[in-house]
């Protein structure tokens, strides 16, 4: 019996991810991997940022879903190019899927590329896609214990965005508890609070992203594996 260790699969993934990152950096594209549970508000968060940037920043989006094109259609409705990856059952994106998507996407003039990962707080953390930045999206309705329960995804991110904060009055969500957990797990992470449908908190995230756009082609920090 032949056995392929998970470590080898991840190593092969990381090699493709490094190529993706080189390609994106060379094209002057800052790539952001957005991770979070199903229903955490990833698409709404991306939509809010795209609306905030308007025509000032040229963006594109790769949507990862097990099935369907609902999210890609929402992005296209904003006039932003979108490409859908259907994983047909797989619960995360990997670097080869993104490499295939990048071959289909016209990156000319694109400054900011969002990749919305499959909704999942577990394995997407282990798969470097070749992004420069990772943002974890966690809605208040998911509970303030999630950083303790799913540490890897929070440790691997450059930013953590608490979403749906306008629901806080109706939910027992202790913001200071999760912020303390995130700081303990990942002291360098930037933390934001967003009510994306109302646009609240969106400018601060946009400013943080814009700072990373201006750092020049080869100076992007990248998430990689921790
Ligand atoms: Mg979505
Ligand atoms: Zn998975």
Image (spheres, grey):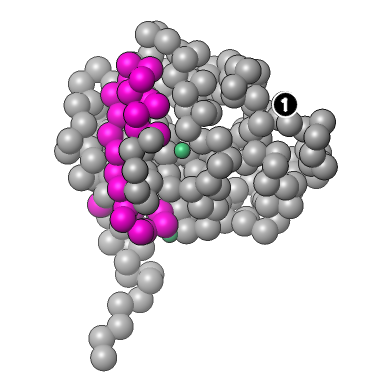
- Dividing the picture into quadrants, the one containing residue 133 is top left
Residue 36 position (above or below residue 15): above
Mark 1 highlights which residue?
A: 166
- Of helix, strand and loop, which one carries label 1? helix
The location of residue 103, given as percent across then percent down, is: 17, 38
| 63 left or right of 49 in image | left
- Dividing the picture into quadrants, the one containing residue 74 is top left
| Image quadrant in which the N terminus is located | bottom left
Magenta span includes 93: yes
Q: Magenta segment range?
A: 71-96
The location of residue 68, given as percent across then percent down, is: 34, 43
Q: How many labels does the image show?
A: 1
Q: Which of 184 and 35 is in front in this view?
A: 35
The location of residue 90, given as percent across then percent down, is: 36, 58
User: Disc 1, ligand 1: is the CB inside 8 Å?
Assistant: no
Q: Which of 176 and 79 is in front in this view?
A: 79
Most extreme residue toward the left is: 103
The location of residue 105, given as percent across then percent down, is: 21, 31
Question: Residue at position x 64%, y 46% from top?
Answer: 186
Within 10 Å of disc 1 (Cα), the crowding (few <14, some 14-19, many 20+) is some
Residue 90 visible, this orientation: yes
- Quadrant assignment for ligand 2: bottom left
Residue 191 visible, this orientation: no
Question: Residue at position x 45%, y 53% from top?
Answer: 124
Question: Residue at position x 50%, y 13% from top?
Answer: 52
- Dividing the picture into quadrants, the one containing residue 213 is top left
Magenta span includes 59: no
Question: Residue at position x 23%, y 45% from top?
Answer: 99
| 1 left or right of 169 in image | left
Q: Which of 32 and 139 is in front in this view?
A: 139
| 1 left or right of 157 in image | left
């Amino acid at each position: 019996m032949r056995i392929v260790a998970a470590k080898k699969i991840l190593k092969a993934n990381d090699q493709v991810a490094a190529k993706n990152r080189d390609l994106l950096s060379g094209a002057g594209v800052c790539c952001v991997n957005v991770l979070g549970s199903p229903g955490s508000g990833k698409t709404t968060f991306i939509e809010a940022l795209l609306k905030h940037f308007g025509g000032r920043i040229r963006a594109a989006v790769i949507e990862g879903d097990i099935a369907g094109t609902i999210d890609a259609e929402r992005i296209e409705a904003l006039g932003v190019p979108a490409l859908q990856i259907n994983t047909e059952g797989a619960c995360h994106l990997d670097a080869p899927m993104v490499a295939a998507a990048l071959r289909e996407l016209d990156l000319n003039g694109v400054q900011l590329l969002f990749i919305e990962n499959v909704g999942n707080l577990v394995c997407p953390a282990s798969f470097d896609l070749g992004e420069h930045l990772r943002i974890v999206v966690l809605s208040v309705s998911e509970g303030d214990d999630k950083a303790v329960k799913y540490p890897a995804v929070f440790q691997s991110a450059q930013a953590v965005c608490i979403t749906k904060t306008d629901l806080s009055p109706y939910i027992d969500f202790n913001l200071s508890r999760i912020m303390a957990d995130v700081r303990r797990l990942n002291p360098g992470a930037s933390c934001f609070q967003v009510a994306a449908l109302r646009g609240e908190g969106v400018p601060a995230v946009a400013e943080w992203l814009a700072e990373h756009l201006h750092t020049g082609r080869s100076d992007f920090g990248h998430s990689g594996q921790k």
